[in-house]
Image (tube, rainbow, N blue to C red):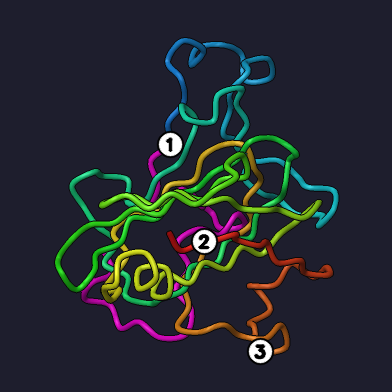
Amino acid sequence: MFKNTFQSGFLSILYSLGSEPLQLWATHLPTNDSNDNEDTKPSHIVHVTDDMISSSVIELLSPNLSDTYITCPSHLNRTLGIKLPLIVLLVKNMNKYFSFEVEVVDDKGEKRRFRASNYQTTTRVKPFITTMPMRLDPGWNQIVFDLADYVRRAYGTHYVETARVTVHANCRIRRIYFTDRLYGEEKLPAEFKLFLPMLSSTFEYENQ
């Protein structure tokens, strides 16, 4: 999708205030409640107004996080082709199970997946997937995920590009973007800020 796009600074793939924030994404809900009323069905992906930041955000809620998610690109046979090494997610802790997954390509041509969740307690490195625990602070969090660093530490290879991003319930999302480096709050463009005290989530990566 972005392979032939000049990539520098910031590259956003989801912004909740856009006219079509999920234009690049496919949404997935469990089929057994897909025809229920939106207000009563247990699983949903909807726009809501978050009182803490007084803004429209995207909410993913489900009793089973594995069957309610959004994924980008929307077509499974396409890839993002984003070479920027850091992904940043502005998400709200809903005090429920939550996970997200990033699929990358390394310099060996292998696809590796990194799955972070707040219900795991240890890091597990397997040939093609690494699962790791994530601690979220109360309220809104800025999740910064250094893809180049994790590829090197888990597989001893070099990050080339990101192929896919998938976000599962349960959370609220303000923005998801890639960046070439970590910027201080004072250097972030205004539209990339939450305008509240920013708390950063912590990953508990362990080399095994």
Looking at the rendered structure, the secondary structure element under dot 2 is: loop
Q: Which residue is mark 3?
A: 187
Q: Main secondary structure of the magenta part?
A: loop
Residue 182: percent from the left, percent from the top?
57, 82
* Disc with the residue nearer the chain's start (2 vs 1): 1
Residue 173: percent from the left, percent from the top?
62, 51
Rendered view: 149 above or below 50:
below
Q: Is residue 126 left or right of residue 144?
A: left
The numbered mark at residue 27 is 1
* Disc with the residue nearer the chain's start (1 vs 3): 1
* Disc with the residue nearer the chain's start (2 vs 3): 3
Q: Which residues are magenta?
A: 1-26
Q: Residue at x 66, y 64 (%)?
A: 142
| Residue sitting nearer the eye, 203 or 89 | 203
Query: Identity of the amino acid at label 3?
Result: Lys
Rounded to the nearest angstrom, the CA distance separating label 2 from label 1 is: 32 Å
Query: Identity of the amino acid at label 2?
Result: Glu
Residue 178: percent from the left, percent from the top?
46, 71
